[in-house]
Image (cartoon, helix red, strand yellow):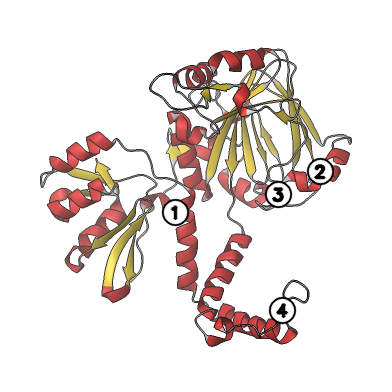
Amino acid sequence: MTSTATPEHRVPAVDGGRPVLSRLVRVDGEEFADRIWSREPLLSRADELGGAAGFDDLFSADAVDELVAGRGLRTPFLRMAKDGTTLPDRSFTRGGGIGAAIADQASDDAVLRHFAEGSTLVLQGLHRTWGPVLEFSQRLAAELGHPVQVNAYITPPQSTGFADHYDVHDVFVLQIAGEKRWRIRRPVHELPLRDEPWTDHRAAVEAAAREAPVIEETFRPGDCLYLPRGWLHSATALGGTSIHLTIGVHSWTRRHVADRLVETAVRAASRGPGLRGSLPVGVDLVRDGAGADDVEQVRAALVEAIQAVDATDLAAALAAQARAAQRPAPLAPLAQAEAARALTDDTELALRDHVAARLEPVAGGRTVIRSRTGVVPVEHADLASVGALLDTGRARAGDLGIELARTLLTSGVVVPA
């Protein structure tokens, strides 16, 4: 059976009738994909993006104050740094007081004190804590095909929060308020993987930081920089408080494919006696390692298993990793539960955004809906109506059957239209 994908994998997300990406780059999507993506930086000024209001709809100074003072944020959703050094969590957090056995909530007065003394405030995971950013980031991730995260950096005047470094993910830098002087330098380590942080190349980074930057520009509200992973960067706030969002794009790479390929092959090879057999009595792995014959036997078994890996098995492993990397659009649990209780045949339902639901065959000739919310069994008689739901994104409860519709509501696969 061919799996059925959710609409977001076929229809680009839009913002005001245009792709979300077009708010961030001054070139069209095709040129960005072919010439810029993962290759070179791209600075897009506010007037080139046609956004007179900048990114005020996504984030603002008022949002910072609300998050710090009114949302009870805990670490690691915030951190602070000064002159390239991260401050201890306990220096800007406090206990929650009576009735809240929490020791690490943001302390607004401590944050204020550190900020006034020149420390940068970092609000992490805004793609989970701030509604406009959450929605925007999910739509951008759907367009790019790569998961994203969003942090905010709030820097006092004439301060540098972090010294020159590189990230192990691509970034879009959105200047929200104030001005910041950015310095960009070429990579010292090309296309770093997630387990290759800049600290592994500290000496090379520090040496490169003494050279002239290839880009040195002042960013103003509404400007946006795309920076591929590995490019060195640092920034200093100028005359006022600077606020910028960093959208981190955690690119899927061929290394991810290789990891899943080897993992699948090892699992398959381990079913045979060659890998399951014990090493000889008296083996000394500490001193000698594995014997040459054992290594060659394992190598041969793995090569054979890698060549035999079915593309379908590999696709399933990659799909599971992709589902785990993001979350579906938020839903309201109480309203959802009430909708499930009040179902009628005429109730209109919509596939939950970004739920990544697919019909998949499983053992025993059965079929399930597999999604970011889990697995829902589907009877053979319901396959046509469920397939139509996944293709179109909408369905009447009566067409699905009340019981199945209720199950899909309570499992979070669909929401009231």
Asked if residue 89 is positioned above or below residue 61 in the image, the reply reads below
Residue 260 in picture, x, y percent from top left: 55, 66
**Considering only order in the chain, which callout, 3 or 4, is on the residue closer to the N terminus?**
3
- Circle 3 crowding by C-alpha within 10 Å: few under 14, some 14–19, many from 20: some
In the picture, the quarter occupied by the N terminus is: bottom left
Q: Which residue is mark 1?
A: 323
> Dots 4 and 2: beta carbons under 8 Å?
no
Q: From where the camera sits, is residue 244 visible?
A: no
Residue 202: image tag: 2
| Amino acid type, label 1 | Arg
Find residue 27 and report its horizontal and vertical position in percent.
62, 40
Q: Nearer the viewer, residue 38 or 410?
A: 410
> Is the residue marked by circle 4 packed among few (<14), some (14-19), or many (20+) residues within 10 Å?
some
Give the distance between the C-alpha atoms of the residues marked 1 and 4, in whole angstroms.
37 Å
For label 4, the residue is 290
* C-alpha distance separating marks 4 and 2: 34 Å
> In this figure, which residue is indicated by the disc labeled 3?
39
Query: How would you rate the neighbour count of disc 2 (Cα within 10 Å): few for under 14, some for 14-19, many for 20 or more?
Result: some
Front residue of 281/276: it is: 281
